[in-house]
C-alpha cells in the first residue's frame, strides 16, 4: 500500500458502524431493561428486536476499536510521536472533556425530565467512554507503534504477513480475545462500557486494527478471500447461540463469534466499499460529531415521541428518524459552521484561500487521517 493511498473502505465501515450504533441505542429504549442502564424506557417492549440486536452487539464495538487502531496507523505515516499525541489530543481528548461537561449533562437533563425528577447537573463519560479508552490506548501503545514504524519491514512484519496469509492465520488474533474472556470472566461479554473487560477487549481490537494495516496486504487479502466463509461461520455461531444457549454462549465462544463477524464485515467492506464520493466525504466528516451528540437527540426524541398514542413500531421508527435527523441538523447548522464548535468536536478549522473561497480541510473523523 502506498503512503499516499487513502482507504475509503475503512471510512465507509466507520460511517456504517456509527449508523448501526445509533439504531442499536434507539432499540434499547424499547427493551424492558432500558431504565436500568440509564435510557428512557417505553411503556411497552419490542423484545423481538433483541434477536438482531444481540447479533449486532457482539461485534459493533469491537469493529469500531479495530477501525480506530487502523486510523492511528494512517495518522502515524506523516507524524512523529509528539505530533501524533498533540493531534490525537485535539481530535479525541478535547471532544471527550467537552462532551463530559456539556453534551452528556444535556441528555441527563432530558432523562431527569422524562422521569419527572429534579434537574441536576451531572458530569460523567456516558457514551463517550469509548473516546477515553482510545486516547488511553494511543498513549500506552505509542512506544510499540513507533518501534514497529522504525523497524519497517523487519522480522515481525514478515512473520505477520506469513501467518495472516494462511487461511487460518487470523485465528491467531482470536486466541488473544478468547484468552481475555477466560481470564477476565466478564459478567456479560457484550457489556463493554465502564468495565475491565471492555477496556482489555478494546485494547486488543485497537492493537489488532493497527497491526492489520501495518502488515500490508496480508490482512486485507485474507478477509476478502475468505469473507463468505467468515460470514457463514458467524451465522452458524449466532444460530447456535440463539437456539441452544438463549443468546448467551460461554464467553470464549462469544469471543470467537465476535472476531468471525468482524472479519466478515471487513471482508465485504474491503471488497466493495473502497470507493470515493461526495456522499462519503460528507458522512465521514459528520460521523464523529454525530456520534457525540446523538444521545441527546435520542433522549429528546424519546421524550417527545414515547407519550404519543401510536403503535410501538411506529414510535421506534420515529425515534430512529428523529435521532438521525436531529444529529445531522446539529452538525450541519451549528458544528460544521462555527469555528469554536469545530474545535470542541474534534474537527479541523476552515481555512481561507485567496480571501475569496473557503475550503474545508479533510478530516475523516474518529479513526483515520
Image: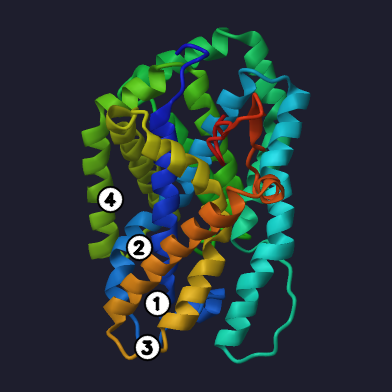
Q: CA distance from mark 4 to mark 2?
A: 15 Å
Q: Is residue 155 found left or right of 47 in the rendered image? A: right
The residue indicated by pointer 4 is 237
User: Mark 4 vs mark 2: which is more N-terminal?
Assistant: 2
Measured from the top left, where is residue 352 in percent x and y? 65, 30
- What is the residue that sits farthest to the front in this orientation? 356
Report the residue at 72% width, 49% height from top.
340
Decide which of tag 2 and tag 3 comes sooner along the chain.
2
| Mark closer to the chain start, 1 or 3 | 1
**Precedes in sequence: disc 4 or disc 3:** 4
Where residue 14 sits in the image (x, y, percent)? 45, 42
Residue at x-position 39% and y-position 72%: 319
- Residue 26 appears left or right of 71: left
Per the rendering, the mark at residue 164 is: none
> Which quarter of the rendered picture does the N terminus lie within?
top left
Q: How far, Cα to Cα, is label 1 from label 3?
A: 18 Å
* Residue 356 position in % (x across, y down): 61, 30
Which residue appears at 66% of the width and 32% of the height? Answer: 351
Residue toward you, 61 or 278: 278
Give how far apart the Cα atoms at labels 4 and 3 are. Answer: 39 Å
> Which residue lies under the disc numbered 3?
308
Closer to us: mark 4 or mark 3?
3
Q: Residues within 10 Å of mark 2 (few under 14, many from 20)?
A: some
Q: Disc 2 and disc 3: Cα gap in Å?
A: 25 Å
**Residue depth check, mark 1 versus mark 3: number of the one nearer the observer:** 3
**Residue 188 against residue 267 in the figure, above or below:** below
Nearest the camera: 361 or 300? 361
Name the residue beneath numbered marker 2: 53
Amino acid at each position: 500500500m502506498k503512503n499516499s493511498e487513502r482507504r475509503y473502505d475503512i471510512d465507509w465501515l466507520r460511517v456504517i458502524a456509527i449508523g448501526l450504533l445509533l439504531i442499536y441505542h434507539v432499540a434499547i429504549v424499547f427493551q424492558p431493561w432500558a431504565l436500568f442502564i440509564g435510557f428512557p424506557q417505553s411503556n411497552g417492549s419490542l423484545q423481538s428486536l433483541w434477536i438482531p440486536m444481540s447479533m449486532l452487539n457482539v461485534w459493533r464495538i469491537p469493529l469500531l476499536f479495530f477501525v480506530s487502531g487502523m486510523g492511528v496507523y494512517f495518522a502515524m505515516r506523516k507524524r512523529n510521536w509528539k505530533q501524533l499525541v498533540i493531534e490525537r489530543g485535539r481530535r479525541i481528548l478535547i471532544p471527550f472533556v467537552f462532551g463530559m461537561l456539556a453534551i452528556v449533562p444535556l441528555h441527563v437533563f432530558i432523562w431527569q425530565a422524562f422521569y419527572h425528577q429534579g434537574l441536576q447537573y451531572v458530569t460523567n463519560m456516558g457514551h463517550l467512554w469509548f473516546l477515553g479508552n482510545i486516547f488511553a490506548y494511543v498513549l500506552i501503545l505509542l512506544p510499540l507503534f513507533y518501534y514497529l514504524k522504525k523497524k519497517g519491514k523487519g522480522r515481525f512484519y514478515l512473520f505477520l504477513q506469513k501467518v495472516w496469509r494462511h487461511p487460518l492465520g487470523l485465528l491467531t488474533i482470536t486466541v488473544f480475545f478468547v484468552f481475555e474472556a477466560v481470564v477476565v470472566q466478564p459478567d456479560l461479554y457484550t457489556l463493554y462500557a465502564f468495565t475491565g473487560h471492555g477496556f482489555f477487549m478494546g485494547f486488543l481490537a485497537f492493537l489488532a486494527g493497527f497491526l492489520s494495516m501495518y502488515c500490508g496486504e496480508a490482512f486485507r487479502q485474507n478477509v476478502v478471500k475468505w469473507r463468505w466463509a467468515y460470514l457463514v461461520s458467524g451465522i452458524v455461531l449466532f444460530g447456535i447461540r440463539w437456539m441452544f444457549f438463549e443468546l448467551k454462549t460461554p464467553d470464549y465462544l462469544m469471543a470467537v463469534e465476535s472476531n468471525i463477524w468482524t472479519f466478515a464485515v471487513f471482508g465485504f467492506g474491503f471488497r466493495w466499499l473502497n470507493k470515493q464520493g461526495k456522499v462519503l466525504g460528507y458522512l465521514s466528516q459528520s460521523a464523529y460529531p454525530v456520534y457525540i451528540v446523538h444521545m441527546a437527540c435520542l433522549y429528546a426524541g424519546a421524550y417527545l415521541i414515547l407519550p404519543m398514542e401510536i403503535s410501538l413500531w411506529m414510535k421506534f421508527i420515529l425515534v430512529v428518524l428523529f435521532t438521525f435527523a436531529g444529529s445531522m441538523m446539529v452538525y450541519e447548522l451549528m458544528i460544521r459552521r462555527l469555528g469554536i464548535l469545530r474545535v470542541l468536536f474534534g474537527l479541523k478549522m476552515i481555512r481561507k484561500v485567496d480571501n475569496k473561497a473557503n475550503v474545508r480541510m479533510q478530516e475523516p473523523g474518529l479513526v483515520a487521517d
